[in-house]
Image (cartoon, rainbow, N blue to C red):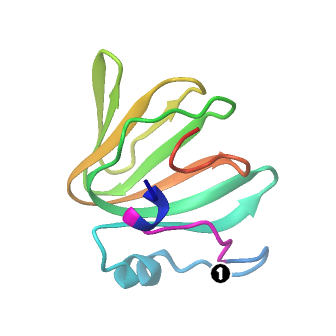
Amino acid sequence: MDFESEYNIDGTIQFNPQEIIDFPELIEGCTKEWQNLALCQVNDSVIRLGVIKGEFHWHKHGREDEFFYVIDGRLLIDLEGRTVQLGPRQGFVVPKGVTHRTRAPERTVIMMVEGSTVTPTGD
């Protein structure tokens, strides 16, 4: 399955160092239910913006941790055996190798930090 087109994932780095990233403008420009943009690279990590509603598939990243930070809305992270609920200004790290999925019952804006070698849809 072509998850990247199903979820509108753009892995192209949008901003270079020393460029201003206007989050409100980017968020307003996201009109689809599931958009994920690679904003910039910081050392060996990529900072991503997600404007999401709905459910992602179960997956894991075998070599990299993944950090989620909620800007607006509510994010549910399903792990094996429990669900973590995050609201605005809350964050959570999913360790490498842990199977998980994210869900957003309403339009939710998140920032993610993950290794630049990670495949956003999982290994």
Q: Does the magenta stretch include residue 39?
A: no
Q: What residue type is labelled 1?
A: Ile
Q: Give the range drawn in magenta.
A: 6-14
**Relative to 38, does residue 121 appear above or below in the rendering?**
above
Work out whether 31 lies above or below 94: below
Q: For the point 59% across and 34% down, which residue is it?
A: 61
Tally the marks: 1
Residue 10 among those drawn in magenta: yes
Q: Where is residue 30 in the image (x, y as percent from the top left)?
A: 37, 78
Looking at the image, is 52 positioned above or below residue 21? Answer: above
x 57%, y 24%: residue: 97
Q: Is the magenta stretch mostly helix, strand or loop?
A: loop
Q: Counting other residues with Cα less than 10 Å from the Cα at mark 1, is it few (<14), some (14-19), or many (20 or more)?
A: few
Residue situated in front as seen by the camera: 18 or 112: 112
* SS class, disc 1: loop
Give the left or right position of residue 119, taking residue 33 as reference: right
Image quadrant where one finds the C terminus: top right
Q: Name the residue under label 1.
A: 20
Q: Residue at x 43, y 69 (%)?
A: 8
Pick out the residue farthest to the top.
81
Residue 111 position in % (x across, y down)? 49, 56
Horizontal placement of 29 versus 42: left or right? left
Residue 54 on image: x %, y %: 23, 54
Occupied quadrant, residue 20 = bottom right
**Direction from residue 25 to residue 65 in the image, left or right:** right
Which residue is found at the position 82% from the left and 53% from the top?
A: 43
Q: Hey, which residue is sitting farthest front in the picture?
A: 1
Find residue 73 and report its horizontal and vertical position in percent: 25, 56
